[in-house]
Every structure is written in structure tokens, then in C-alpha cells.
Amino acid sequence: MELKKISQEIYNPVSENVKKLAELFPAAVKDGQVDFEALKQELGQFEEVGKEKYELTWPGKTLAKQLANLDIVGRTLKYVPEDSKNPETTENLYIEGDNLEVLKLLRNSYYGKIKMIYIDPPYNTGNDFVYKDDYSKLKEISDIEEGEVSEDGERLIKNQKSSARFHSNWLNMMYPRLKVAKDLLTDDGVIFISIDDNEVDNLRKICDEIFGRDNFISTIVWEKIHTRKNSAKYFSESHDYIVCYAKQKVMDSQSKGWIRNLLRREDTNAYSNPDNDPRGPWKHDPIYANNPYDADYTITKPNGIVLKRPQGKYWRYSEDTIKQAIVENRIIWGNGDSYPTLKRFLCDVQDGLVPTTIFKREFAGDNSFGNNELKNLFGIDKIFSYPKPSKLIERLLEIGSNKTDIILDFFSGSATTAHAVMQLNAEDGGKRKFIMVQLPEPCPEDSEAYKAGFKTIADIGKERIRRAGEKIKEEFKDKEGIENLDIGFKVFRVGDTNIRWTSEAIKTGQIRIEDNLSSDKDALDFNPGFTDIDVVYEIMLRHRDFPLTSKIEKLSHIGERTYIFADSVVVCLEERVTNEVVDKIAEIEPKPLKVIFRDSAFDDDISLKLNTMNRLDVQLKKHNQGKEISYRVEFI
């Protein structure tokens, strides 16, 4: 019987890529290593790309690529129940921490699960703060020596235009985050990225490289300001961009990929039903237009007046179409010699509208709308700089997501995206889920936010979700089913691992254990400040396809420290594993896929461990009427 340790890895895309390569070209992968000569033979006599090739390059690009593929060691997400809202029922998440770490930590749980990503990263205007990532593990660069980060390890630096690496700093921040984010998207997923003229060209180029140029969808122009600034030196800038890429674009009828949704019609108020037509609301549709058509005929009204097409105008419809409309009672004849109109029924057009690349403020909001939205929620002006309006994100959600999808924003700021998700769910009865990620960046002490008691941007975001959710529920209080609207969220915070690994991590010096360990088993297995629930969540992160909103249940009938998550994985943290504990685990229905024990529970007694595992196997077969059970056992 194999007694296997639980995996220490959370993020290892390199090994997965090698596995994918082995599936395509088995002869090119030998003992887990790529034989590049064999790979070239498999590919045929293709000409290799030379050193000079068309691509965007910058100082640090190679390291940024390596950073995207670097495993994350000794980090986890810790549950913060006191900041959470409706944690027992919600499927939403708010995560505080460096978004690159968070994206890697989420990779197992949400690989290929996110339908839509929206981010509003720093625009790199010269006054923005950008993440300064830790390259020290790559052993190829020293941030402190280059003066790029302070000696106390500040996570953000102000990227000023006077810097010799102004654009490089921004690209080195964005590249690995987008690279990891792509893995989280579903095959039919989409990403929207807000940006302005400072970096839109560079953003397009790195997205071409990461997502593929063929998967570029469009660049949306959003009208962020509707007033002219006469103080502008050249032009009064009224717009921002939103760059859109699909994980996969639908190229033909056989391929799968992202398909945009139609927008809800904004002009439905123009439809009415003054004659109580059983076909529902309609509006007048002219039967002539300025554009030339081939049709040239006369129309005879019921009063006998014969109408030719107006001078300089043209019929919009063929004569047969008009005759059919008369039969179907779709013509409004009007009085005298006035020209008739066609009834255009709402039911004929309610499928929606194809979105355009121009987002006008009337439908997508603007900066003023975003500011007023926060002011109305908090009663404070300028609590957050340049928040995006929820109407803008709501419009993107309509285009890019369906009613049960997961939405991710890993530069969440004031949490506009969460606000928009809840708002749209209230309007269309959807059950979209959100994941917000935000570094707990301190608010300046002279800011309105700090004066109001908000110490970090994350504090603002969490409070906005709380207030916006309650406000939305009140606004829709008369709507059927509004009581089921999910306005809660579970809060997690990036922190050091809870588990004192006793395998290769210790041997390589990644995690050190003092020479004189306490006889306390908890001190042996776990780091100070741990909780059992944090350990369970950390184990969950190391398993594929279990979202962090999965139910965790304490199995009190088995022991005070035994849990099960997603009705699938039992985590037994008991300091002693007795026969009674084993027998009760074997009785769990439905049968778990995996059972995890602590190594220390067996006091290094391999015979005790083997006997216990044999008993578990026997008891499981007994409760399954002698049939073989497919399950795994692992150890912390």
C-alpha cells in the first residue's frame, strides 16, 4: 500500500505543459524530460525562428515569463470570518493580497472555471503605483541592488516617467498576471481590460502574445467624460479603452469559443399597445427611407387614395412584404393622404442588440456617475479616485457572461465589479458569482477614506459590497425571489502556510523546523496561529476543481477535529486515529474520494499506520457490501 504525502504544490504549469506535450508527441518526452531533438523530428523539417523576429521585448521580459511559471511555496489563503457576510450561503469571494500570488493560489480550484475577467489595472500615467514582484527566487536579479524596491520589501512602487524602466516596470507587472489569468478562463471565456493611451499599444502586444492575435475581439471606446476641458494643451480627452480578448475565438462552425451576447434593448419604452393588439407592444416603423431600394410601386389606401413613393425617398420594403403586412393587419393607414406606417412589434426585436465599440455615457455611465455612485453609498465625496461606474461593468457582463457564470476582477479597487454583478443578478434573476482580489494598499492618512475609518483600499471595497447589496435588495424589494439574491461574500487573506511540511520543502531549506521540537503534535505539524479551518482550506487549495465556497462540515460524531469538504474529502486532524475513528469514517455516505490523516497521529509507527489503513479498507468494503471502493489516502 502506497502511503503518500499530500501534494505541496499549488501551481506548477510547467509539469502540466510537459504532460500536454507528451500527449501530442510521446516520443519527445522521456522520463518527464523534453527531448528537443526528438521534438524537432516530430514537427518535421520546419525552419527555426531566428533571434531576430517580430515581437515586443523589454528589459525583464524573460524573468516575467519565468515568474509566471514559478510555483508558489509556503503561501496560502486564510479565512477571515469576521469580515465575511453570509458566509454559510454565499458563493462570492473577496481576497486580500498580491494578485499574482492569489491567481496562482486559485489555479487548482478555478482552472478553466472563470467565464469573464474584468480588470482596471494602473494606467501607467506617471503617478501610478505598480506591483514590484519578488524575483529573488529566480536568483537572477536583486531588486534592492537595482534600487527598484525598498529594503523592507514594499509591494508597490511609484512608477514615475523619469524612470529608465518606466514602460518595462509596467509590462513586467502585467505580463505574468495575464499569463496566469488565462489559465483560469473557460475555453469560451473572455477578458476585458480598461486602459488609456499610455499603454494601450503595449497591452495589445502582450495580449497578442499571451492570448493569441487571432483571439483579439475588439477595442471598445468608453466615453468617460462628457464635458470639454478648454485648459487641455492639445485635445480634451473624453475616452478610455477597454481591450477585449477571448480565450478562444469561434473561427468556424466546428470550433468552440467565446460568443458575445446581445444587449438588452434600451428603447423598449418607445413600444406601446394603444389598440390592444394581442401580439403585444409595438411602435410605428416608416415604410420609406433615404436609402435607395429597387422597389417602385404604388400603395392604395382603404380610402382610395393612391400613394407613390415620396419625392427623393424610397420604399423600405418590397411590394410583397407590404401586401403581407396588410393581410396581417400590421399597417397603420393614417388620415387623408398621409403615408402609412408599419407596426414593429417588440416581440420581433426583443432578442437584443449587437453591441457597438462605442460605449456612450447614457448607457455605460461615466466618471461622474462612478463618483456619485460611491458618494451616495458612503455619504462621502472622493472616497476613492476614479471609480468605474457599475453601469459600465454591467454592460460588459451582459455581453460577456451568462446567468450562472463566475466573474473575476483581480484589480478590484472599490469593488465596482461586485456591485455590477449583484445589480445585474437583481435585474435579470441571474446567479452570477464574483471573485474580487485587492492588495490591502494603505489609504493615505490625509485622504477622505482614511478620515472616515478606512485604513486600506480593501476596506473600502468590502464595505461597498455590503452597502450596495443592501441597497439593491431594497430597490428590488417587490420583485419575486429577490430574497434569494446573493449579496454575501467570504473573505480570505494571503498568508504564510499553516503546515510545517516535513518533506522536501524542509530539506531544501524552504521551510525550517527548529532542532528542539515541542512534544506537542500541533507544534510539530502546524505553524503558530493556525486554525483547523485554515488547514482545511489550505488542503482544499491543493485539490483540483473544489471552489473555495465549497461546504466545509465538521464531523463531530467522529471527533472534534475531523472535517469534510464538498462532501468529497475527509480531513482528519485528530492527534490519535483510533479504530473507532476509522470505523466512523468508513460509514460516511456518500463515500469520500479521499481521506487525509496526520503523520504524527501514528507516532512514526509504520506498522500502526499500515494496520490502520488496512482496517479502513476492510470497513469501507464491508459498508459497500464487499465491493471495491475507489478512494485515496494521503498524509500531512
Image (cartoon, helix red, strand yellow):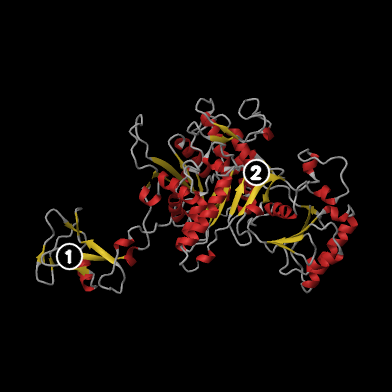
Of the numbered discs in the image, which one, if any, rests on residue 340? 1
| Location of residue 342 (image quadrant) | bottom left
Q: Earlier in the sequence, mark 2 or mark 1?
A: 2
Residue 196 coordinates in the image, percent (x, y): 44, 38
Residue that appears at 13% across and 72% down: 302
Is residue 26 visible in the rendered image? The answer is no
Is 517 left or right of 155, judged from the image as shown?
right
| Residue drawn at point x = 81 percent, y = 65 percent | 617
Mark 2 vs mark 1: give the one in front.
Answer: 1
Name the disc covering residue 14, or none.
2
Residue pictured at 85% horizontal, 65% vertical? 615
Question: Can you say which quadrant of the picture contains the N terminus?
Answer: bottom right
* Residue 166 x %, y %: 52, 29
**Label 2 packing within 10 angstroms: few (<14), some (14-19), many (20+):** few
Where is residue 460? Give x, y as percent.
55, 46
Left or right of 142, for residue 620: right
